[in-house]
Amino acid sequence: MSATKNPASRPSLDGITLEMIVTQLSERMGWEAMGAAVPVRCFTHDPSIKSSLKFLRRTPWARKKVEELYLQQAKASIKPAASSDG
């Protein structure tokens, strides 16, 4: 099975580090919202970038969920241009 990337429908994580992802999500959403979206202790109990990175680097399923959350946020912030009908 080969995974195909469709840049039109999904932004890429190329060149984006896990630290950048966690930092941007924490600034945009806040730790509480991140903990609601991905319920892991590193977001819900005394959250920090450092503790989150340590956990996410050792926990592939959680990292995947955080990356998906980041992509959802990125996609939501890129609004398609409205077509003008006249």
Image (cartoon, helix red, strand yellow):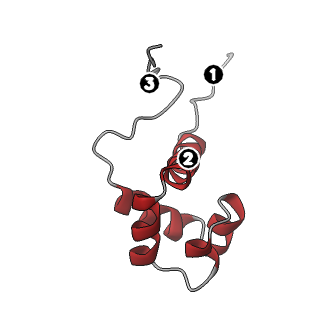
Pick out the residue farthest to the left: 15
Horizontal side of 64 relative to 16 (left or right) equals: right
Say which amino acid is labelled 1: Ser
Mark positioned earlier in the residue sequence (1 or 2): 2
Horizontal side of 86 relative to 22 (left or right) equals: right
Residue 28 pos. (x, y %): 54, 65
* Mark number displayed over residue 72: none
The residue under the point 67% across, 74% down is: 32
Q: Give the residue pinned by disc 3.
A: 7
Q: CA distance from mark 2 to mark 3?
A: 15 Å
Front in this rendered view, residue 35 or 57: 57
* Mark number displayed over residue 83: 1
Q: Which image quadrant: the C terminus?
A: top right
The residue under the point 52% across, 43% down is: 71
Pick out the residue farthest to the bottom: 46
Say which amino acid is labelled 2: Ser
Q: Give the residue pinned by disc 2.
A: 77
